[in-house]
Image (cartoon, helix red, strand yellow):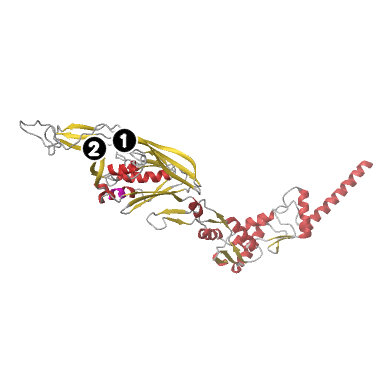
Amino acid sequence: MKKGTKFFLVTLSLGLVVLAVFAFTQFTYGLSMFDNKRFYNGTQVNGINVSGMTIEEVSNLISTQLIDKRSDVKLTLKYGDKTWVWSGEDFEPNNEILGAVEQAFKYGREGNIFERRATIKQIKTQGYKINIPYTYVLGGIDEKLNSVAEEINVEAKDAEVFFDPSSEEIFVYEKEQIGKTVDIEKLKNDIEEAFKTSSQVVVDIPVIESYPDVTVESLKEDIGLRSTFQTSIATSKADRKHNVKRALNSFNGMIVAPDEEISFNNITGARSAENGYKKANVILNGVYVEGTGGGVCQASTTLYNALILADLEILEVNPHSLPPSYVPLAFDAMVSEGYSDLVFKNNTDKPIYIRTYGDDKNVYVEIYGKPFPEGFKIVRKADFVGVLNHPGDRIVKDTEGKYADKVTYEGEYLRLKYPQEGYHSKAYLQYYMNDELIEEKLIRDEKYLPQEGIIIEGTEKLGEGMTLPENTVRFISPQTSSSTTKDGVESKLEKQNPSGLNP
């Protein structure tokens, strides 16, 4: 035999011996690392030696053990002052052990052959203990946990504000609610970990809190009195007072959303008896006449002034033909169905709240919303520009006989109305911070056109020998100058257009 051949045979023999020794050693450590169906030696599951057993054998053994001890099981869950308690008999037996055993079996069988050998050595020296908790035989536990969660879970709820202008507090707040959601996955893990060391466990229910976007504090920060305004109805007749209050009451309790536009005419509706209005003076062709809804313009004017003092955007406003005496010139707001309206817009980023009320002497409007900065205020300023001269009287023949009971013949005169001078006035808003004027803004430039006087004359010719009584109607020529001053215009208006007659 050749030397090289002999060396080869010796080497081969030594290799076979080493392989045999290795196989035997693996057997003493546990089952062969090539056998992926049985547990390694040194493995314990729930205190039972399962060396060399198959997954199914271990699953059946542990399942039987846990089911037999279900009577010892007691699960107590706690949250706040609430407690939920179940014994093992409260659960339906199930067999979910197989999945848990399969997970335990994977230990040491990952990686290459050398890594698995290292795991086998670790098991041999330290052992490998697996604890499968009672939760794997507590059938229906998910349903019980979900039922508990339903008792605890609550959605986060924003705080709310309720506007009740008739109550003493006006604004009533409902507190926000913190949301609570049971962390089911963590609860399951906590229960499973607890059952690894005891059959009777007490577990605190973990809850995830969610917080609302709107709180009572944030609502209160966004609501304050922005303005208040009042006008007098002390000299008005009862029906006119009723109409002013009736119109303003349409706005009492109104909440105007950001960017929302409001039409006075749309809100108050038709000036009719069916809509609750009574007869009072209105202006028709520059003359006060009785009409249904007289006084509504004072309601719109009172609201208008509160709106501008609240710094809200006015989209439409118009002056009267005869300037009213209950507000300065250029601060009135005439409304008429299909003809003239007061339209405003909430130009803030928060809701606006309107409160109106009145007594026998005054009517009031209050505007609430996002508060102005501390020290800030808005003031009205009326700038009387001058007088617009009236054109004097115009004589109108009573061709239709409308006034036949008062004038019949030529030369008989009846004064229907006096001429009135007109006025030019500007309205400003002044903005102050800590009593320092920071801005002045022109908001109106109005001309109340002068009114001609109207004299009615009869149309029939005098008969022969007939004479007329002395004419007491004095013809007024066109105006060329006026003594009306800035300081005296309001008192003059009160005489010419008494607030009790104003529409």
Question: Residue 299 in magenta?
Answer: no
Q: Nearer the viewer, residue 475 or 44?
A: 475
Q: Secondary structure at mark 1?
A: loop
Residue 101 in percent (x, y) is at 66, 57
Residue 139 image position (x, y, % from top left): 56, 61
Type of residue at label 1? Ser
Viewer-side residue, 172 vs 113: 172
Q: How far apart are the two marked residues, 2 and 1, measured between alpha carbons?
A: 15 Å
Magenta: main secondary structure equals helix
Q: What is the number of the mark on residue 418?
A: 2
In the displayed structure image, the side of residue 221 where residue 414 appears, left or right? left
Residue 497 visible, this angle: no
Question: How dense is the environment of label 1, judged by Cα within 10 Å: few (below 14), some, or many (20 and up)?
Answer: few
Task: Tell whether position 245 is magenta.
Answer: yes
Callout 2, which amino acid?
Tyr
Q: Which residues are magenta?
A: 242-246
Mark 2: give few (<14), some (14-19) or many (20+) Cα within 10 Å: some
Residue 402 has which mark?
A: none
**Residue 92 x, y percent position in the rendering:** 55, 63
Outermost left residue: 464
Label 2 or label 1, whichever comes before in sequence order? 2
Residue 482 — which label?
1
Residue 125 in picture, x, y percent from top left? 79, 59
The quadrant holding residue 284 is top left
